[in-house]
Amino acid sequence: MNELMNAVRAGRSDLIPGLLAPLDRAARRTLLTELQALRKEARGWGWTRWHERAALSRGLWLAGAGCHTGAAAAAAWIGARDLRPQPSRSRSAHLMTVLDGQPAEWLGDVAHRLAARQATAEEDHELIAALVSRSGCAVPATEPFVHGWVRALTDEALRLGARGSQVAEGETPLGAALRRHPWTAELVPRVFETVEPAPSMAGWDRPATPGHWPAELAALAAEGLVERRVLLDGCVSRLVRGGRPAGLKVFLALLQQLEPTRTEQVERFADWAALAADGPSGPAGYAQGVLAGLAEAGEVDPVRLAEVSAAVLFRPEKKFARAQLVLLGKVLRRDPGARHALLPVAGPAFGHPDLEVQERALALVARHLRAEDTVLREELLGQAPVLSAALRERAAEVLGGVPKGGGAQGAAGAADAPGGLTGPTGTLPYEEVLPPAPERRPQPAAPDSVEETVELVTALLAGRRQGWRAPDPVEPAEFERALDGLVRHAHRDRAALALALRPALAGLWWATHGSAPDGLTGLALPVAAVLGTVRAGELRLPRERHPGRASCPSDAVEDVIDARMREAALRVLTDPQPFLLATPSWETGTIEPADLVARLDAYDGVAVGPVDFAQALLRVRRDPGAVAAARALNTGEGARLADWLAGGGERGAPERSLHDPSKTPVHVWNRTRADYEQTLWETAEHSVVRGEFPVAFRRFAEARTATCWRCYHWPVYDPQHTAVVPEDRETLAAWATVGVTACATAGEEGACGQLPRLAELGGPAGPALHLLVATGLGARHADDRLAAVDALLVLAARGELDAALVGRELAELLRRGTVKPNRLADAARTAASTGAYGTVWTVLADAVPGALGAEPLRGAGELLAVAAECVERSGAVGPCPVEVAEAAARGGSSQLVRQARRLRVALGG
């Protein structure tokens, strides 16, 4: 037994099966008890013994699997995360050796239990497959097992391709692997049933290429090795279920490879209709093409075609609407009698956001509506008010009536819109509709009990490994509440708090065995201090490093947060504070000056933490009315607060645009990393921070004023950063310019998510913030543009939006190529659709000239269309921009010329 235990400790998988074989059931039960005790002991080992733990895990995994007599316990042991050795062929072979004496039914039960483990079944596919083959049980059909099968076949195809000689002439490696595998016919149908497509199957850039999954599955169907109907039904149902477009490409490619016959298409008419109405762009386009072919062949009656067309014309994408109107025209030319069923469908297209779609719908009605169609004419006339104002005169000619403007007009007697907007002639007065300004929410109070504090801390640290920040950012309000609770309860009874925290954080090695503070960040530092796993001498505050060289903003802010956590941890160990000064009053991170004065007053006899007080100053709202109360404290901190509130460190918002040629612009040198150079303005506040604040804040001030270089942080949004200076949106906006610019120029994603929060913070809304919003409106990804639209509307609702400034910035961004007209048009259309037509026009009035000129930018016509729609809806009047008038005077009938003329007419030109 000692020899076996030594082999287990050494991880000798080659020796364990032979040493385990002579043992009977009783001896194995005894050995299992020792193995379980050894496993429990290893969980408490520190990180310095990781080599020893890795070897032990291999031995424990193999020996324990051979000692369990119950299938459920054996599967739990084999699938345990803390025992898992690296997957390998030898691993499976050794396990099958130690399980050799078990009955087939037992092996099959273990196989299915392992296949049901979502977290490990894909990785364990080879092992599960060996158990299934040995036992002869049914093949598992769980999602991770199917994904593992797909990956195993893909890997096998790569091996066959590398050898070459093992593949028959004219056969591809993947085709050979599929034909040789005994479970192909059984598992191929399961590929379509998984929630997410198998990554190994969906990871090809061109899935229809021969040798890839779609082409090979289609070949199997042609050979009769896989049933064709199964593939067709699987593809169609998978596309109808939807999902990420990238994951659906492989199923669409397989469907195209199968080339459904006319009969197969007719059988699945309802599926094509559902895809065309609601499917992602690629599958919807394919389905629309199939339906068009059926309709042109006379396989679809007018009523069903009308139902499908109504759904397709409701989609916002103009390509679908245009194609459907073309199809309706073809059907009506072949069968004029179908107009009573099909022409009413053109009515919803009158309200389509694309003017050309409206024009085509009206032209379709004009071409096929007859004089005797009185009822149909009245029905269409009732839908005509949603037409663009530029088409209402034509609609009156076609329908024999005068459509009355409606749509976005507000109620009579509404307040005048900004800028003197009055509404179009003959309609109700225009009323600008803006979302309500977001209301500030107070910071939740600190938890009253130790139990609640432990719950908050555990929730924030549960997603971290060894104290590092969790992948998902933590909201400042949650973080501050947990930190506040820690500090307060450590001051009242640190021993009781530590006693409650220790079992809750038992899974974190630093919480039980200690760690150097340099390996911990965020809330882990004060928690480790409460638990006593760090020493006071190790919690040195950072010294000045690299004097004279600036920090990048991300490093500088992280230094401030780290310094604050270190000071809080040091005070827990040496001089516990009753509470923190820098805890926000509002969830945004702002502190009310009255709250800070009250906290300083309550600190009677308590030493003020320099970092804590410095952070409080950066968070406090500037209110000169609180200066007297601060001075009345008669303390050094009270005097500093009074000076700060009175303007001794007053921030200086720049008066000119960031595009001013006398200032160094922001560059993005690398399209995947934020290597950049950034120059901001020196203000009085910066010099105060550098001269009087702790060292970490001095680097923070340098990052706000000096050239920053070689920043390798991904330009993503961390709400913790905004909470450091919640009353200085201009600095935050300038820091974010690089990431947001990358969203517009390099296709980065996510950095614009901070824009709505920046719009809600305090401090001046100056040129930096307006430039940031303008840049976000031209981001590549729709979610980023939507965030910029939200920020624009929040600023407008708060009365802080300088729409003309945003327009001028957009004009410059358009000229430089940072923002593309079609992306700006999409964002502007989204903002206007909320009812803010007047606000959006005020922005576009200054932005549109940037897209025009001697050589108008591609997509300028689409931008002009949105501008014209805003003017028509809001009734704005005024001089037509020179660039628009010049575009309108051009010859031809391009969208650019037509929309420029439309805008000129709408403005009264």
Image (cartoon, rainbow, N blue to C red):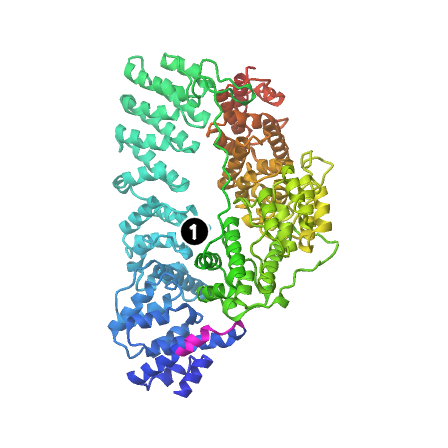
Residue 801 occupies which quadrant of the picture? top right
In the image, 693: left or right of 780? Answer: right
SS category of the residue bearing label 1? loop
Q: How far from the left and from the top, in percent, is residue 686? A: 70, 45
How many numbered circles are shown?
1
Image height check: is 688 above or below 858?
Answer: below
Dividing the picture into quadrants, the one containing residue 261 is top left
**Residue at left 74%, top 56%?**
547
For the N terminus, the quadrant is bottom left
Front-lying residue, 589 or 554 = 589
Which range of residues does the magenta coloring cover?
A: 37-47
User: What residue would you read off at disc 1?
Assistant: 209
Q: Position of residue 878 (x, y in %)?
A: 58, 17
Say whether residue 352 is visible.
Answer: yes
Instruction: Name the residue nearer the viewer: 341 or 286.
Output: 341
Residue 563 appears left or right of 3: right
